[in-house]
Image: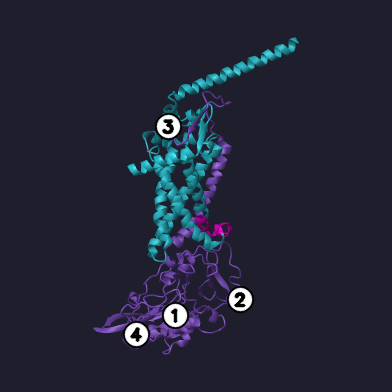
Chain colours: A cyan, B purple
Amino acid sequence: MSVTAKGFDEKARGKFGRVGTTRVGRGELLRHPVYTRFLHWSVAIFFILSLLTGFAIYSPWLYLWITPLFGGGPRTRLLHPWFGLLFEVFFLLQFVNWFAPMAWTHTDSKFIRRLKEYATNNDNVEAEDTGFFNGGQKLYFWAIAISGLLFLITGILMWFDNVIPRWVVAISYIVHDVAALVMLGGFIIHIYEGTAHQPGTFRSMVDGTVTEKWAWTHHPAWYRAVTGRDPRASYEREKRRQADREQAIEEWEREQDRRDQTS
Amino acid sequence: MTNPRTFQIQEISAHPGPVPGQGTQRAVQVCKYIDVTTCIGCKACEVACVEWNDHPFRETTFDDTYQTMPSTEWNYWNLIKFAEDERDGNLMWLMRKDQCMHCEDPGCLRACPADGAIIKYENGIVDFQQDNCIGCGYCISGCPFDIPKFNEKTKKVYKCTLCSDRVGQGLEPACIKACPTGCLHFGTKEEMVQIAGLRAKQLQEHSGFASAGVYDPPSIGGTHVIYVLHDINNPERYGLPKAPVIPPSYTYWKWLAKPTGLAMAVLGVAAVFFHRVFYGPKLPQPEGPESRTGPSEEIEAGRKETP
């Protein structure tokens, strides 16, 4: 990552941080600052718009469903490349923003090998060395980066298909579709993981915070880095705290029962 | 472009489901037959085309040939192509009337993503419906003959209609009517193939063109515009592809891989839904009521994530 890009990113974070703030409550950690959240949702909005306009043109089975949303076929065609271009712009900024934490490590390869255990909820606590992002998130990020590049190249070729040689357009057509399907697959999993599958995750992109419990469960190495505490120890401590609290509540209940009987 | 009552529609571009009226009427296959051996390059057909379709005059590009312009244009659908060739050490001038070939298996229609923008009638005419055209330009890359042309102003694509408006009223196309040498013919496909075959045979036997033949390329199921060429083995000499093909992007990919991809996406949504039903959520551990410890703080959000 070049120095200028990094500098720009730092500056943007600073500016956005002055405009918006993130409230971190008791037992919570800051996960995504305002600038990151802004980029994420900008990328998301233009991705969804590109997806809808693109899939209208992708399949005759969707054409009549989706084109009315954008004011008819010609307008859908007109808007799609611009939505795509804005997606590219915002993703480029996010790419710069997340380049460092998205670097692939040995841990991530281990994560991919244990994907089955992850997907079937057998590992309820992540491996000790899982950092800010896990292998799955990084895989999705790099899939978008590569797809994004392919979208941009083939998209421009197809945008001006009245002057580009016909076989170049015909090949771009397939590459654009494959990139879109790969991204759609990742997108479905991404939304599922961020909402229904892992409660407590969605708020990290809205409010910008997560609970400490969430952090040591899903990203132990990151928890260690920001709090300086051992994630395993914190987990055990929380377990003891819960057991003690339950015991205390039971004792209190027994106490109440005794009091009720004597009175 | 034409009165829909006149012709029965056989195929509609990007149309899910059946084509209304398909096969409900008897329709003869029409065909234009061009004998390039008797074309004198007078361009009367070009003028007739511009006149009948009321096209505005356009600037031409002079490229040191007798051609009116380098290629057909969105408002110039009929163009005589002049190719300088050689025969027995002498100059041989090949003149070929270039226009839409009205393929039996039209690449433009295969490529088109807009419902009803390209229509093929039972009689074989392939017609663009600009009202439904979204101007994506895929038809341009689908066409093996470089015929559909984009209009930057209207953002629509145009091409020869085989005068579907005239044919619908029982008239021959305008170009046919204008030809002074009789090198253009119009009739049923059966008839045209027959007389073209006779002409080719005549050229072989009496005029010394041993390899004369009929151009009706089977790689796209034949065309509704056929040629008699001096040399059928080298159609490239006239600027015609030997075996015109539609890119697989608009055939196998579009009709097989695309729906498969879509089905996989739907299955993917179903898969994550039922994953939640089968495996439940992944809760922060240990499960149980949240205990909030530590101080509450309001921090500046510009802080960098710690990777």
Circle 1 chain:
B
**Decide: marks 2, 3 in contact (CB < 8 A)?**
no
Please determine whether, in this image, residue A76 is positioned above or below residue B171.
Answer: above
Residue B204 shows which numbered tag?
4
For badge 4, the amino acid type reads: Gln
Residue A130 shows which numbered tag?
3
Circle 4 chain:
B
Q: Secondary structure at mark 3?
A: loop
Residue on which disc 1 sits: B57
Magenta range is: A53-70
User: In whole angstroms, how far apart are the C-alphas of marks 3 and 1?
Assistant: 70 Å
Which of discs 1 and 2 lies nearer the camera? The answer is: 1
Camera-side residue: A236 or B196?
A: A236
In the rendered image, residues at marks 3 and 1 fall on the same chain: no
Q: Residue at point 54% right, 46% down?
A: B269
For badge 1, the amino acid type reads: Phe
Mark 4 or 2, nearer chain start: 2
Residue B172 in the image: state x and y as whole percent.
Answer: 51, 84
Please determine whether, in this image, residue A196 is positioned above or below residue A164.
Answer: above
**Decide: marks 4, 2 in contact (CB < 8 A)?**
no
For badge 3, the amino acid type reads: Thr
